[in-house]
Amino acid sequence: MKALVYHGPGKKAWEEKPRPAIQEETDAIVRIAETTICGTDLHIMKGDVPTVTDGRTLGHEGVGIIEKAGKSVMNFKKGDRVLISCITSCGKCEPCKKGMYSHCENGGWMLGNTIDGTQAEFVRIPYADTSLYHAPEKVSDDALCMLSDIFPTGFECGVLNGRIKPGDVVAIVGSGPIGLASLLTSKFYSPSEIVMIDVDDGRLEAAKELGATRTINSSDGNAADRVMELTDGKGVDVAIEAVGIPATFDICQSIIAVGGHIANIGVFGQSVDLHMENLWSRNITLTTRLVDTVTTSMLLKSVEAGTLHPERLVTHHFPLSDIQKAYDTFSRAKEEKALKVVLENK
Amino acid sequence: MKALVYHGPGKKAWEEKPRPAIQEETDAIVRIAETTICGTDLHIMKGDVPTVTDGRTLGHEGVGIIEKAGKSVMNFKKGDRVLISCITSCGKCEPCKKGMYSHCENGGWMLGNTIDGTQAEFVRIPYADTSLYHAPEKVSDDALCMLSDIFPTGFECGVLNGRIKPGDVVAIVGSGPIGLASLLTSKFYSPSEIVMIDVDDGRLEAAKELGATRTINSSDGNAADRVMELTDGKGVDVAIEAVGIPATFDICQSIIAVGGHIANIGVFGQSVDLHMENLWSRNITLTTRLVDTVTTSMLLKSVEAGTLHPERLVTHHFPLSDIQKAYDTFSRAKEEKALKVVLENK
Amino acid sequence: MKALVYHGPGKKAWEEKPRPAIQEETDAIVRIAETTICGTDLHIMKGDVPTVTDGRTLGHEGVGIIEKAGKSVMNFKKGDRVLISCITSCGKCEPCKKGMYSHCENGGWMLGNTIDGTQAEFVRIPYADTSLYHAPEKVSDDALCMLSDIFPTGFECGVLNGRIKPGDVVAIVGSGPIGLASLLTSKFYSPSEIVMIDVDDGRLEAAKELGATRTINSSDGNAADRVMELTDGKGVDVAIEAVGIPATFDICQSIIAVGGHIANIGVFGQSVDLHMENLWSRNITLTTRLVDTVTTSMLLKSVEAGTLHPERLVTHHFPLSDIQKAYDTFSRAKEEKALKVVLENK
Amino acid sequence: MKALVYHGPGKKAWEEKPRPAIQEETDAIVRIAETTICGTDLHIMKGDVPTVTDGRTLGHEGVGIIEKAGKSVMNFKKGDRVLISCITSCGKCEPCKKGMYSHCENGGWMLGNTIDGTQAEFVRIPYADTSLYHAPEKVSDDALCMLSDIFPTGFECGVLNGRIKPGDVVAIVGSGPIGLASLLTSKFYSPSEIVMIDVDDGRLEAAKELGATRTINSSDGNAADRVMELTDGKGVDVAIEAVGIPATFDICQSIIAVGGHIANIGVFGQSVDLHMENLWSRNITLTTRLVDTVTTSMLLKSVEAGTLHPERLVTHHFPLSDIQKAYDTFSRAKEEKALKVVLENK
């Protein structure tokens, strides 16, 4: 079969590789119907993720058809259409029992990281029963593919951890795919304002179309001041960090209201200066989280019911074999006006 | 009457002052029976709290007898024995309605700060109905006096915000009165381990007597390593910060388990370096809080029922007129083995 | 002034009465701009509410302008436009401090019950600071008038107690004004299905227009069976009881899924047969509640933000002086297709 | 091997039976070290549980040593000492993922019900990875055996569902093993009062020794009145139903305070009269639950830490081969002063 294989920083190839086989009776082999590229894949290509080694097939998102299921797999059989979770969960360890699949002692983020991933014609999924989801018939591949990672991430790390309530004023710093997934799932809880903040006007325009009540371009360094003006000096009830650098974290801590929640999603490569001299008395809550994908069933129900439209983030389609071109488009997201780029294997 | 009056950094006097009078019909005048000195009072004396100006009577803790109640006061009448909350709450503003009395728009921390306080023979309490509590007959003045500030603080900011559950491993960094109040109220939730960390062996000994399951002297800079050893490298479920400096905050962020809670109580004068590069994926929660004193009724019930003994933190008694000597003792806490020093007006 | 006065079962008169005056310094006098009639008012007229005695002005809902504020009133002054809560709350007693205003030891449901109410040109509001709300400028009287009682009731007793989550299947038994208020506020939490059940096709049609995903006429006694069919035998996540008779309660207990919530709103005059022989092992939660009106601020924010349109329940307008005609219309709700009937004093 | 086998109502035999073997690769075979008899076993013997058929080995509680583990079992190996959960959980279905193991689509209460149970020398445990727990070395068999069923039941259905808070007044109706397990685990949350109610003075005496602050013998039908007296007419914050008949349910609904929680544990064979005419406005919560055994790990940690002593409920020990005598003793609990009767296979 063909797969996109990592060969060290800056090097990847669409090349022939043996088809994956069942290794444990709890595995399943999935024929990929659609996959997509994550910002994390770009980080891997820069060499930022040392657990990814030469020879690894990339990708941790996707939808497909069960080609073969191990003997102990109970929930799935050959021919079932499935959503692949970016998090592999054994369902048997202490973290899994607590619903913290991200820290599964036998799984976690494995696909396209410590084992071969989904940017290929076939993929092996360990612990299939607890790492795959049945795809509802009427939900499109595009919508499903957004539920592998970015929607649970935006929802769990941003919206749920931020404990958004009806009537809240919410700010989301970062209007990329994850920030926009937070925006769309914020609306589940009917906040009164959703302020999107980014440096790219194109993405802010996308945010407006998707339901932001206000947008702020933070290029001039005054975003925090403008949020404080908008809120009569009170700040926001919930600030979602969806970038992962000190400057955007700073905006969050500057605009959070007394009693508010800062929910971090961003992947940080460095420490930040936390202004405890201001915050110690302000009754705030700051959370971090690696996505657990514990809400995937609920998100699927919402898509099926028509209360969530994740496919709205898909801006580009390519045949799977054009994946190198797709990476190129995705890496020039601003000029290509790209949000999520999907690869079809049809 | 006599009162302890602040006259600028380093200067205070036990001097004659006019007795306070009702200013608003919601006020009450309380004759002090017992008051105490807080670490914050020492900060004020250093000039660290600019809202406290020359001429201010110090003190925000105490128990006493209603001398006079304003016409609109419904819950109290002359002669009632009352506990004074360190937080004045109007009960009518948005923060008060949310139970965030600390940020009351008309009150908050006023006593011994923006209005005259409790280190005097009499004190005026604004919004008496929502800022005083009836003292149960069989509860001693010493016990009550501990419920003005340190027990609600240790409990709300540390224990409740830390969401301690039965079986949890808890670490409390700082074994002063607040840390010890957290220790005693932690036991409400039956954790399996309570590790107390401090640089003073005398205070650690006190902690042991009060129920710490382990103590660690952090003078050698290895406290975090020792906690990680104790917990087989997992870290603690809840870390309570009860000091307020970068070094102790650092211990907390170094020892927190995946999924754990860091609950800050410490008053910070500077920012800290938050290691988001480690924490972003660890599903942690960090909280800050100025005490709201929303749990005072519950603490009173627990003291009355004998499930909490706050008077165990009282190490020294002085007549109120010896308050200067009491400050001296309290400021040399280590050598005097002082925890809480109470002043009796009898 | 003129007021609608109760004179015993079946007897009421629109008659002259002295204008109310300030009795306590915490009172305010409000000039009514708009009021409405509640199902409870019809119960009173039947003689079902013994606390209402001859001579009482009826009504517990309304919006108006402050005519006079007592000296201790801090939040309001003459000329302020205000929303009147159906629940009077002192803000100082134990239940009020817990947010359970419905059981305020000094208030609770007083208006049009134990003191004169809002179906008059003027009304006296005790504890004005904690029983009135500032009306946002751009929110209409019709919308506000719905927030005195039915929206907090439908939301708190039904939606919040039912703990509706995104993706849930919700059934609301009873499609009168309260049930419809539950329907509209259910949507705050993005359930996947909202099934409305009633015996009146007109009301079910209204429910459809307001966003019900399905409606069931329960006249034939088969409503429970049809819900079970719709849900593949699983039942609903949340069942809201908005009628108050054994038959409708029965539907709720018959259709509740394992792990589900039954949230009662209905006013019951008799006991019900609770099928513990089925329910004991089904992990269900049943709640009751008298509205606390603790969410009024949040509802106001949502109306202001345009995420809630309570005025959609207003079907009829009358001048206040035509209130007898309005009662007549409201009491023949089915044939008049009446939901909420408002009275304007302009 | 030998096993206690059910042969229809009133008939059981300690007889030879083939040793169980691995049927699925997720099974484990456990050599029983200790087992016990549950009230439910007595119900089975009366013929009340139709799912139990002739030939079934009884028993759903126990501790033992892994004799053999199926190939897919990851967490356990031959020789491991294990606690057997009364609930079998596949860990893969929707209810299991929600932590509602009691309603596992592939498991639930199977042992000694739909498959052979633990009152035997060996037992087969399906889904071993998610249905067994490692036994901490220093915890005794007696303590462990209490954690198979009665402690998770008393804790989850009673204490957790009752949401007991520090300072609460709690009443537990029924002072049998389950009620006493609720009593002991109630203390995790430091209530101010725990009132135990029963008709048997011997059991009330046991309750006193285990920490009840008051006991009431309800034989005279006045228990509810006495609770109301004790609480100055307010009633209790939490009422736990640990019997399962209308009379005890009635006590709970009569004594519940405004805002309180009724947590049902009792197994009901009939419906009850729920006084909605009183309760509709009292803001109460009523819960039911079949034990999920989701807290087993936490209970194990607490036993290990010495904050819980479940072995205190063990009153009698018998050799496993004397199980018929043990049943006899347990069925005459009152005269034998029996709480839990354990069987040792040594």
Image (cartoon, coloured by chain):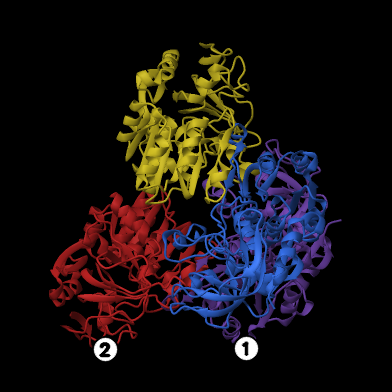
Chain colours: A blue, B yellow, C purple, D red
Residue at point 54%, 65% (across, down): D280
Can residue D293 be seen at all in this image of the molecule? yes
| Residue A141 spot, x, y in % from top left | 68, 74
Q: Is residue C277 above or below residue A276?
A: below
Image quadrant where one finds the C terminus of chain A: bottom right
| Residue C231 spot, x, y in % from top left | 58, 80
Instruction: Please give the chain letter of the residue carrying mark 1.
Output: C
At numbered mark 2, what does the secondary structure look like: helix, strand or loop? loop
Image quadrant where one finds the N terminus of chain A: bottom right
Within the image, what quadrant is residue C343 found in? bottom right
Residue bearing the label numbered 1: C220
Going by the numbered disc 2, the residue's amino acid type is: Asp
Instruction: Please give the chain letter of the residue carrying mark 2.
Output: D
Residue count near mark 1 (Cα–Cα under 10 Å), binned few <14, some 14–19, many ≥20: few
| Residue C327 spot, x, y in % from top left | 76, 69
Going by the numbered disc 1, the residue's amino acid type is: Asp
Within the image, what quadrant is residue B93 found in? top right
Within the image, what quadrant is residue C185 found in? bottom right
